[in-house]
Amino acid sequence: MDLLGYGAFFLTTALIFSLVTLGLNLQWGLTGLFNVGLAGFVAIGAYTSALLTTPDDAARLGGFGLPILVGWLGAMVVGGIAAALTGMATLRLRSDYLAITTFGVAVVVQLVALNAQKLTGGPFGIGFIPRPFGGLAETPLLFNLSNLAVVCVVTLIAYLALEHLARSPWGRVLKALREDERAAISLGKSARFYRVQAFAVGGAIMALAGALQAHFTGFIAPDNYLPILTFQVWVMLIVGGSGSNLGAVIGSILVWGIWAGSGTLTSVLFAPEQQARAASLQIVAIGVMLCVILLLRPNGLFGDRPRRPGKRAKVNAANSSSNS
Amino acid sequence: MSLQFIVDGLLTGSMIGLGAIGVTLTYSILRFSNFAHGDFMAWGTYATLAVVSAIGATFGKVAPIAPLSFGWPLLVALVVGMAFTALLALLLDRVLFSRLRSQGQAIIVVMASFGASMALRSLLEFTFTSRPTYFSRAIQIAMPVGFGIRITPDQIALLLLTAVLVLGVHLLMTRTQTGRSMQALSQNAALARIVGIDVASVVRVTWVIGGALACVAGVMIGILVQIRPFMGFDMLLPMFAAAILGGIGSIPGAVLGGLIIGLAEAGAVQLIGAEWRAAVSFIILMAVLFVRPIGLFGVRER
């Protein structure tokens, strides 16, 4: 029974991760937009939903005690707007500028979460976030399973919607822009407009994932949204193969399995006072893994990003100073 | 408002500026934003610290040079640390960046640098733990220099060192053949190849300069603030903002950008409070991207 409960808990977390990864896949896999601040968007979603749904608290703004679904919707709206603004500022510039700006967004969100006590509760975070099946908390197994069911449904909806989007005319424009921007523009597609849309939808999905996680644990704090989260999700997407939604989901479950498994292993192998150090070794291993996959199998397990050694590579080689 | 923020700002600005030189060179010559640059800083600082303690173990306690808080061991260690950091950058380029560059997708290199940054930083945390350390715990008396400004001998020495290094790199870039090759490569890579510029050696020089200066910036932070595994990562956003504010590829721009951001940060610390310091570079970055994305001394890309 315990094992089943743990399994449900594990899968719930993994599926929430896959929701973030699906959002990233829309931004990076489908559209080629580089987001190294996704932890910021996840945090925006979590905090928005928490503010909207928690009971009134004299120490800070809100909570407004609204229904959970309103919280999730609000999270998506705010996350989407934040992403759209980020996109509008940077998407007319070189792709690196988006990377740097998203990195900055994550830093600032972290800063607000830590310091704007009136809004976010500061370093102590926000507690008493209503849980969808809080009434079942007495029977942990049932509670975990019903959480899993909710997360499964949300992830499935997001997955199907994204699959549909990718095949729709809208998705084809995005792919065309990724593959050959000049040709797509010559067909009358506004590159920037489509990219901002894709970035905003991706940001909204990430925010939704943050909100789900917040309501599932019932408590959030700034520490949940450190750069390590961004990093984990990137590894999930790269392992699964960018461009494939199925890959995003499977990559997330796989990498979260490795992460949780190695975490358990270090807690068994190392003495309690050595655990913090062992945890950093875990990050080293995942970082090396990311680099090795990029070097050896850039398409991941299910990637659809075609490697064309043809025209584009030549153009790039000519443009870049690459290669020693 | 006390004018002390000018000294604080110039010092922070020097650290940011020295780091931003590496960022701007990597960006303009190798065409990617290197998220591992901050971790070069931290690695250089810990390497310097290791050499300092090794010297201390061999020669016993060395008296510091008159008014400064450090003696010759730190100077020797700094040179060793600079060489070490340059080698680290070259090594990382050899095993990772150069291979990905040859595949032709610039943004993959950025991602790899992000992964490498995580791995490098966590390795430091594993080896030295996340507890902060210091080069010296001695407290220096700040001398009043008028207008309510106080400055310590260490701070004067480090400002002078920054000025010398920046001047040196500027002369290297403008007066030597290597520097001119670097500029040529950043302005037009294809043409630079055609006229027979040795790309491989230019790439190596870029990493050596970037790595060595990152180490100096890190050691400055180590002397004036503290040494932590995250010290470099926390400098990443100010460094990027400085490089973009100054204009990608411009060394005077990177330094000036660093000084502007340093002064703005120090001013914000006085006016708003230290906890919002990190937001300053983001605000400046966004302002530059909206108003003048090519920066102060940048050239429009063709």
Image: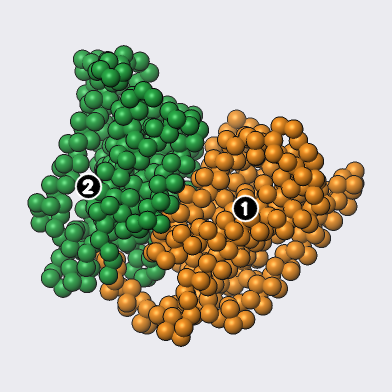
Chain colours: A orange, B green
Quarter of the image with the C terminus of chain A in it: bottom left
Quadrant of the rendered structure where residue B137 is? top left
What is the crowding at mark 2: few (fewer than 14 residues within 10 Å), some, or many (at least 20)? many
Q: Name the foreground residue: A249 vs B156.
A: B156
User: With respect to residue A95, does A269 lie above or below?
Assistant: above
Residue A91 visible, this orientation = yes
| Residue identified by numbered label 1 | A42
Mark 2 near mark 1, Cβ–Cβ under 8 Å? no
Q: Residue at x 57, y 51 (%)?
A: A39
What is the crowding at mark 1: few (fewer than 14 residues within 10 Å), some, or many (at least 20)? many
Secondary structure of the residue carrying numbered label 1: helix
Q: Residue at x 56, y 68 (%)?
A: A197
Q: Residue at x 19, y 58 (%)?
A: B182
Count of number-bearing discs: 2
Which of the labelled discs sits on residue B252, or is there none? 2
Quadrant of the rendered structure where residue B41 is? top left
Chain hosting mark 1 = A
- Marks 2 and 1, how far apart at CA: 38 Å
Which of the labelled discs sits on residue B222, or is there none? none
Secondary structure of the residue carrying numbered label 2: helix
* Relative horizontal placement of residue A319, taking residue A289 as reference (left or right): left
**Amino acid type, label 1:** Val
Chain hosting mark 2 = B
* Relative horizontal placement of residue A95, taking residue A157 as reference (left or right): left
Q: Name the foreground residue: B60 vs A52.
A: A52
> Residue B5: x and y, percent?
35, 28
**Amino acid type, label 2:** Pro
Seen from this angle, which residue lies furthest front? B1
> Residue A45: x and y, percent?
66, 52
